[in-house]
Amino acid sequence: MNNPIIICASGNSVPFLNSQYYRTHCGLPSKLQYTIQNNVSIGLNWFFKYGCRTTFTSWVDWQWYVWTKEQTQSLPLMVGNYDQSLKNHNEDLTNKNTILLKSSNTYYGKESIEKGVYTKHLVGIWAMSLAVSLGFKEIYLLGYDCCEVNGQTHFYQGVIDVNQSVPLKLRGKVVENRPIFRGVGKKEDGKYKTGTYNRKGKDISDTYFDKFTTEKDVKIYNVSEESIITSFPKISYEELYERVGDIKVDNNAIRDKIKEALHERACDCNR
């Protein structure tokens, strides 16, 4: 994996135009869209719908995967957290485009695929662990803010219905209607709906992100000058464009290599 990899999260530092999204269903600037689609990239959660197509999509919340199953079945590759709820003795809830990996509360660095990907607590951390274990040496983080930027926590906050919910069933009975975008925005008391954001930047960095600084041969850049994460150098989008250059990788070939590596190295969660 000699190319850079771009991991696309949903923080509001990702430039996005609501009016453009309503017209074209893509609110990203054309240069950013081109850069993401022509480099190796991971889209996290809703990025496939509100951002653009990436090399593959990752998630850690099995309920999110089930809720979006019909929408994501046409994506070329989904790589996410194994949960026994997706593959129980009665049914297999996964699409054919999906590879599941075991997670861990311990960071195993380059052996994460074999031993467990750190950590299912945060999809952004999980995807970084996966990228390191796949062998990428240059990682760019988009939307890794862990805070509110210009009045929003998520770049797509202005084009979604934050009150949209789905029924949560227990033993076949609906026990509650759970908001789909329950981590977006703030509560009435001013606290973030995403609990991790309520922690201080140094605390978040010490707990989760500093582990990646032990990878001396891996360079990680946070493309968010507003981010409260202190572990990595912060760069602008113009610096991102300069660093990755005007290239066009063969994402189909890269995707095949990633599939091969995961099937060879991971414990078999996909049966």
Image: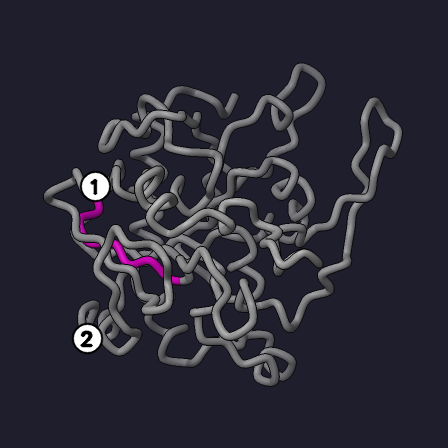
Question: Which residue range is magenta in the image?
Answer: 136-142
Colour convention? one colour
Q: The disc labelled 2 sits on which kind of residue?
A: Glu
Query: Can you say whether 197 is above or below 65 in the image?
Result: below
Residue 242 badge:
2
Q: Position of residue 94 (x, y in %)?
A: 60, 34
Q: The disc labelled 1 sits on which kind of residue?
A: Gly
On the rendered structure, is 92 left or right of 270?
A: right
Question: Which one is nearer the viewer's eye here, 29 or 122?
Answer: 122
Residue topped by disc 1? 135
Query: Can you say whether 125 is above or below 192 in the image?
Result: above
**Viewer-nearest of discs 2 and 1:** 2
What element does badge 2 sit on? helix
Q: Residue sitting at 74 percent across and 49 percent down?
A: 179
Query: Can you say whether 18 is above or below 261 in the image?
Result: below
The disc, 2 or 1, on the residue closer to the chain's N-terminal end is: 1
Q: Is residue 169 magenta?
A: no
Q: Residue sitting at 32 percent across and 29 percent down?
A: 113
Q: Residue furthest left?
A: 217
| Real-space Cα separation, disc 2 to disc 1, in angstroms | 22 Å
Q: Position of residue 247 (x, y in %)?
A: 22, 70
Q: Position of residue 208 (x, y in %)?
A: 35, 39
